[in-house]
Image (cartoon, rainbow, N blue to C red):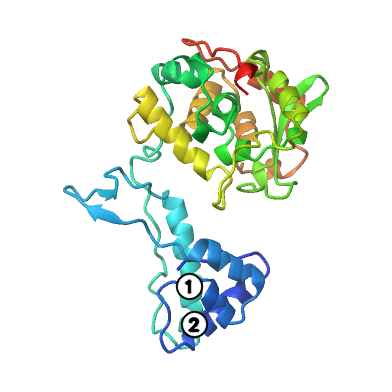
Amino acid sequence: MVLQRDQGRGDEQVVRLASGLAELKNPPVFVNRAVCLGLHLPGHVERLAGEVVDRRPPAVTPVEGHEVRGDDGLDVARLAPQSVTNAVTSVGSILSWCVEKRILKENVAHGVRASKSDQGHECRLPYRPEDLKRIFEDLPVFARGHRPHGGAGHAAYWIPVLALYTGARLEEIGQLMLQDIRTEGGVVFLEIGDAAEGQSVKNAASRRRVPLHQRVIQLGFMDYLAETRRRGHQDLFPHVQSTKAKRTAAYSKWVNRYFRQACGITDRRKVFHSFRHTFSDACREAEIPREVRNALMGHRTSGVDQEYGDGFSLRVLDRAVQKIQYPGFQIPPWQAAHA
């Protein structure tokens, strides 16, 4: 059972949930919406339980070598060590209260943290030049203007392009609205944030402005913007939809499967998020300072000096972005005829 604690009211939620569960003669294994309603918990906790807590793990089958695979025989996605630690910490908050109230003798989650292996970020690898060439030159989406249904129309073309040249997360791109593409001082940029209904960001540092590379504009991005606006849409990618909490959940499954099957990129450590690693490497090759790279990618920074001022100007960020180069392949221009 995993609950994220909201700032300011998290303790109250944890206390009410733990207290309610402790009073049940037969505590449920899974906490769902019905259980929360029975405990008379507030609406936001009810929603949290309905969306987060009542998720059973996918069916997995142990195989030789202690690997874990799903029903389809493919590797099951694993959480990052920090995500595991965050989940254990949340559970520990409930157990600590139970110990305090003498419901339990000890908090078995105390001091438990997921260890970070020596492999570090081996779970995600950047795309190599040969991978990028396969994606942007060989895939029918780019080579022939094909628009598969799972690719949500022109999102099949533009989301990978934007990921390559901005380093933005998939959800950050997929939830953009037309009003989030802005121009200031001659610089076209993405306003990544959570101002509109349905938008969300990972953390405060994720709210940022990312200038568009001239190559993106040359490929026809402003024409796509105009066409989407002419059709009466407000979302940048109106066909990117999902019944899951994340808007890009369905697109994520499609694009990773598409890259594997149509491109032959079978290394499971190379997924859509690899574009973010690729962008980070490109920034290093362009000798972009770490602080500027963090600002572009929405990474948290440390140090007292980071707490003052408004950060880097759009001019500085734009100058950095324009330095990024991806030699060895050419992306065909966007084809509006396949709208």
- The N terminus is located in which quarter? bottom left
* Rendering coords of residue 328 (x, y %): 46, 10
Q: Which one is earlier in the sequence, the residue at label 1 or at label 2?
A: 2
Q: Nearer the viewer, residue 44 or 66?
A: 44
How many marks on residues?
A: 2
Q: Quadrant of residue 104?
A: bottom left
Q: Quadrant of residue 160?
A: top right
Q: Secondary structure at mark 2?
A: helix
The residue depicted at 41 percent of the width and 36 percent of the height is 124
Q: Secondary structure at mark 1?
A: loop
Q: Which mark is residue 21?
A: 2
Q: Indicate left or right for 124 with 291 as reference.
A: left
The residue depicted at 40 percent of the width and 69 percent of the height is 109
Q: Which residue occupies the extreme right position in the image?
A: 185
* Rendering coords of residue 122 (x, y %): 36, 37
- The C terminus is located in which quarter? top right
Q: Amino acid at mark 1?
A: Val
List the residue tagged with mark 1.
31
